[in-house]
Amino acid sequence: MILQGKHYRSGLPIQISCSEGIIDSISETQTSLEKDLIIGPGFTDIQINGYGGIDYNEIQSDPIKLAEISRLLYQEGVTTHFPTLITNDPAQISRLILQIVYLRKSDELSRMSIEGLHIEGPFISPIDGPRGAHPKEFVSAPDWSLVQKWQLESKGLIKMITLSPEWENANSFIEKCVEHGILVSIGHTNATHQQILDAVSAGARLSTHLGNGMHPIIARHPNYLWSQLAQDELGASIIADGFHLPAEVIEVFQKVKKDKLILVSDSVSLAGMAAGDYDLHIGGEVSLTPEGKLHLKSNPSILAGSASNIRRGVSFMIKNKLSSLSEAWEMASVRPQKLLNPGHILFEEGAIADLILCQMDENGELKVVKTIKHGQEVFSA
Ligand SMILES: [Zn+2]
């Protein structure tokens, strides 16, 4: 397979050849390109609850229904994603894990696209505000034996855990996770400055959707936002959908976190659906606007989760001049991969051919034209 386009970083025309799912060569080309196509690595979303009306957090009558998520995400350039299971009854989390294990066993594209699981909770803050929409009844102190059980059930697929270090046993738990190759991210937290420092010393390396999952009003200082911003060892993920964070907040996070800032969608099942009113069995009556804002039907100022995707996040960053095209692209591909797959190479000779070809429309929106997963064309506009 030969692909041509402008390199997403340099802007120079390049030609990529791949065989057997691997990039054989990337070389500059003199051939004038027929269209203004930009080529780069596929996007990686490390936080996704559901998409296209399907939810990883629900037991499906037929687990194969979940296979649709990978296909829908290819349309948005997402070649790798980490299904995210939120706070729930531990036995239910086990059932949801087994459902994904079954899905990966039965569907090749899901197996390739799902590189790991992100467990968000139940070891988060029980406090209203930081806890967000996670059900309080299942919030608990970190429990390593529980994670070992889940890890066994998932066949080693758990790659990331979001927790709050405010629990007394958090540090020994974080050390265990790190020892076993699980990325620990701080989120939904009400931790003190010292607890955050200790978590970083224990090996926590990321803040989950920084600026969300917080109290609506916090003390000017000290507070857990400053504490996480001040730690250079902590990267941060953000939901850049235009609704979860004002642009100026992202601007500050960019300046502080630099090349450790990454994009996530944190999408719920209604992402990728048509605008309209929906009745969710968790969340009740919600409205999805044509702009992609998902809010309680009764109160448009209360968000009911994210209905975005990574491609939209990249476009938001570019349109609002928060970053260049190449930087936004890296926030959605190279950077999350580096965090969760250290040592894994991307967009180089010898790398797995997970590639996307995009075009920028007149409104500055990045549109996906073609998606290649492991050297196989999985989407063409
Ligand atoms: Zn969350």
Image (cartoon, grey):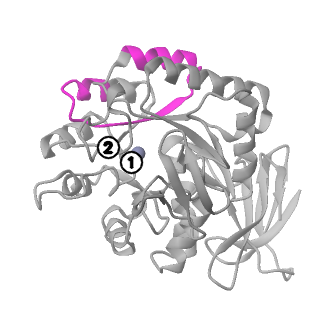
Q: Is mark 2 within 8 Å of ligand 1?
A: yes
Q: Is mark 1 within 8 Å of ligand 1?
A: yes
In the rendered structure, which segment of residues is drawn in magenta?
A: 145-174
Which is more N-terminal, label 2 or label 1? 2
Q: Is residue 35 above or below residue 314?
A: below
Image coordinates of residue 237 in percent, x first then y, are 42, 54
- Label 2 sits on a secondary structure element that is loop
Q: Is residue 224 rendered to the left or right of residue 116?
A: left
Where residue 188 is drawn, which disc sits there?
Answer: 2
Q: Is residue 283 visible?
A: yes
Image coordinates of residue 14 in percent, x first then y, are 76, 71
- Mark closer to the observer (1, 2): 2
Ligand 1 in which quarter: top left
Q: Nearer the viewer, residue 255 or 28?
A: 255
Residue positioned 66% across, 56% down in the render: 272
Is 167 in the magenta?
A: yes
Q: The N terminus lies in which quarter of the figure?
A: bottom right
Q: The C terminus lies in which quarter of the figure?
A: bottom right
Is 138 in the magenta?
A: no
Residue corresponding to mark 1: 208
Image coordinates of residue 208 in percent, x first then y, are 38, 48
Q: Is residue 46 rendered to the left or right of residue 25?
A: left
